[in-house]
Image (tube, helix red, strand yellow):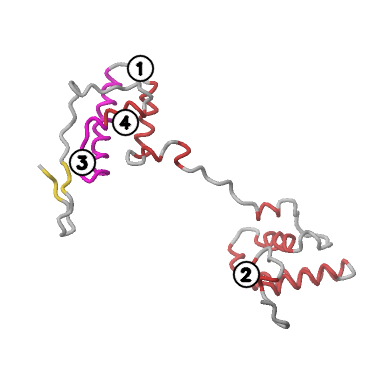
Amino acid sequence: MDIKGLDYNTAREKLVMTEYGREIQKMIDIAIALPTKEERMRCAYTIIHQMEMKNPQVREGEDYQQTLWDHLYLMSHKQLDIDWPYDMSAAENILSKPAPMAHPSAEGQSRMRHYGQLLSKVFEQLKTMPEGPERDELVRLTANQMKRDLMTWGHGSIDDEKVADDLARFTDGKIQLDLSTFHFDRVNAIVPDSGNGKRKKRK
């Protein structure tokens, strides 16, 4: 609804840096329109002072004066014709956004989230390890840790075949557990909470 005499923020130009408010932006627009460079320069210093008063936390940064002038440069849309006291070549980096982080599923981590990052690295190591006592011991330790993780994740359920299947899958088939000969360490299963807020171990 358009009501004559009312000025809505939604109808105004979007602010480049909202922390300084619209009044500072108006001052910058006035400075841009001043006829001489000397006037624009004096106005720019006045605006910098007002910006510092408006956003005092900027002083916490190192070289905060450079930051203020960078902000002025950006808020003027690079149209303020003055002799800038600092190099403005890197000012636009302030508005750049960091590259989005890859979702864990893109790296295959979501499918083994209950095993954690440490075991995922062990799986990679097992893919290239030569056969021998050292690999056999690492397989034993890994399989038992997987079983403990599955018990915790599954609230007490333990499945040896699940461990063997996951170990083979996450090592690209390099490690095959023979469940008829492989012996897991004894693991105490966790009994579901009985209501008193404490967990009990099943012996």
In reply to whether residue 8 is colored magenta, the answer given is no
Q: Is residue 58 left or right of residue 66?
A: left
Residue 55: give x, y in percent of width and height. Answer: 62, 69
What's the amino acid at mark 4?
Asp
SS for dot 4:
helix
Quick check: marks 1 and 2 in contact, CB under 8 Å? no
Which of 85/119 is in front? 119
**Considering the numbered disc 1 on the image, is that residue within a helix, a strand or a loop?**
loop
* Residue ranking furthest to the front: 1
- Rendered location of residue 194, percent (x, y): 14, 55
Q: Nearer the viewer, mark 3 or mark 1?
A: 3
Please tell me how crowded label 1 is: few (under 14), some (14-19), or many (20+) other residues with Cα within 10 Å. Answer: few
In this rendering, which labeled residue sits more in front, label 3 or label 2? 3
* Near-viewer residue (9 or 98): 9
In the image, residue 203 sits, relative to residue 92, either above or below, namely above
Q: Which residue is mark 2?
A: 55
Please report whichever mark, 3 or 2, sits nearer to the chain's N-terminal start: 2
Residue that numbered label 4 is attached to: 166
Name, please, the residue furthest toward the left.
Answer: 203
User: Counting residues from the N terminus, which is met first, the one under dot 1 or under dot 2?
Assistant: 2
Which region is colored magenta? 133-162
At 18% from the left and 58% from the top, the residue drawn is 197
Residue occupying the point 84% across, 62% down: 81
